Every structure is written in structure tokens, then in C-alpha cells.
Amino acid sequence: MNSRRLILKLGALGLGVVSACSFTVPSEDEVFGGSKGGADSSAAGKSTTNTAGSGGSGASSNTEAGAGGAVSPGGSNSSMAGTAGTPGIAGAGGEGGMDSGGAGGEPPVKPKGELINPSFEDGLVGWTVDPATPAVFAQWGGKDAANVRAVDGNWVLSTWDMSNAYTARIYQVIEGLEDGTYKLTAQVSNKAGLKRGELYAKNCGGTDPAPATLPGAITFFEVSLTDIEVVGGKCEIGLDIDASAADWVNADLFTFTKVPP
């Protein structure tokens, strides 16, 4: 009788212990702060072709990250890996790839009988700089520009080197011209006292005109060459500069037009 009572008391005590230690398994939402965050290292952004721009934010699952940027000209052939996620925060998507630049489209078709990029809105595209030098560059000349205001568009050709003397011929060869007489103009401003600063036309098939000396004007001034005789369909036009350190030249809006007979 006493043994049975002892067993019953122990059984009741055991139930009490179980009841006191009972627990509920938490949900994923409770563990991850109400949403599933990115994993410790997000998946790489999806590989893309010719992409640029940043990818979207990562999905809310544990292992995914955002895709690479949307397709656009320029860009790259592969995406960068997304950043590591943390519980409750999705991993960020990878940016447009960094390994190599995209094709960015075909080179511009050279128009026959016309100047390419005469106002330098596409940098130095179409122009040759000889010898190659960092002293020759395209400079911002928009309405908020601090140094120079463009005559046409938002960019100008500039030459300048604070510490070193430099020489440069900035030119292009126009092809597909009709034979005849032409006029060359350019808007130019430059520091006075250049060793040489000239607008020229040569190798045009006829007699080359004498170059026009740059004006030494602080503001843009139109420099022109007339009576350029073209025979054989092509002509080289450009600027020829020999400058001391800190000498500068700005140029914009070149034109090359046939003069009516």
C-alpha cells in the first residue's frame, strides 16, 4: 500500500517537472526578426552582357542576391558578387561587371566629306593627337563650367600643362571631298605668347594656304582659312601648337565648307 502511494506521488511529481520545462519551437520569422534575411554570403549577381549600373536589392530568401544591372551600352561582361547578407536584411545585388568593358557599340562611321565631332561633344573621337600627350584633352564647358564656356554644346578642346612645355598637332583627315575651294573656321581662345599656335590645312592636293596664327584672345574668337584648294578628295585640317609650361589653348566648333564657285 505504501509502495503504491510512493509510485503515484513520483508520477505526479514527474508530470509537474515536464509541465514546468515545456517549450514552443520558434518560427523562422521569430528567429530572423520577422523576415528571412540574406545568407552570410549572398549569391553572385547574375552574369550579364554589356551591362552597367547597379543591380536590384537581394530577394528575401536566405541564399539569393539581386541580379546584375540592366542591359545598357558600355558596361561589362560579368557581374560582381552581391554583398554579404545579415539576418533580417536581404543581400544587395552585384553591380555591373568589373572584369572588362562592354563593346559600347560600333565605332562611328566616318562621314564622307565631313568633319567628325567638330565640337568635341564626344571627347577626342575622330581627332588625332601627335605626339600623344596628356596636355591635350576635352574639357567641360557647360553653363556651370568654372574655366571655359563652350561655343557649341558642352565640351571644348583644351591644351595645358602646368609644369612642362609641350607640342601637339590636333588634326583629322577629311575624305570623300568634292574637288573645289573650301573655307576652314574654328572658335579659339589662347594665352598670348605661344611659341607656335596655328590653324592649318595641308595635303589637300593643291597649294597649301599659309596657316592662320591664333589670336591670343581670352574669349573665343573665330579664326579662319580661305582659298583652300582641294584636289583628289581629301584634306588634313587642325591645330599646330608649341607651348611653354602653363600656356593654354581652347578650341570649339570647327567647320570645313565648300565655297560656291
Image (tube, grey):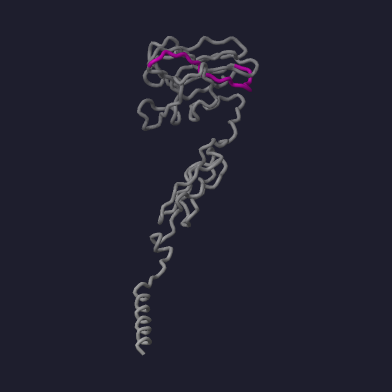
In the image, is 22 to the left or to the right of 49? left
Residue lying at the far bottom in this picture: please name it: 1
Residue depicted at x 40% and y 61%: 31
Percent of width and height locating residue 13:
34, 79
Residue lying at the far right in this picture: please name it: 232
Q: Is residue 153 magenta?
A: no
Residue 152 position (above or below residue 188): below
Residue 43 position (above or below residue 100): below
Residue depicted at x 35% and y 75%: 17
Q: Which residues are magenta?
A: 163-180
Residue 60 position (above or below residue 237): below
Quadrant where the image shows the N terminus: bottom left
Question: Looking at the image, which is closer to me, 55 or 244?
Answer: 55
Q: Disc count in the image?
A: 0
Percent of width and height locating residue 110:
60, 27
Percent of width and height locating residue 96:
50, 42
Q: Is residue 170 magenta?
A: yes
Quarter of the view holding residue 73: top right
Quadrant where the image shows the C terminus: top right
Question: Looking at the image, which is closer to me, 53 or 19?
Answer: 19
Quarter of the view holding residue 22: bottom left
Residue depicted at x 50% and y 53%: 64
User: Most prominent secondary structure in the magenta stretch?
Assistant: strand
Residue lying at the far front in this picture: please name it: 2
In the image, is 232 to the left or to the right of 256? right
Percent of width and height locating residue 7:
38, 83
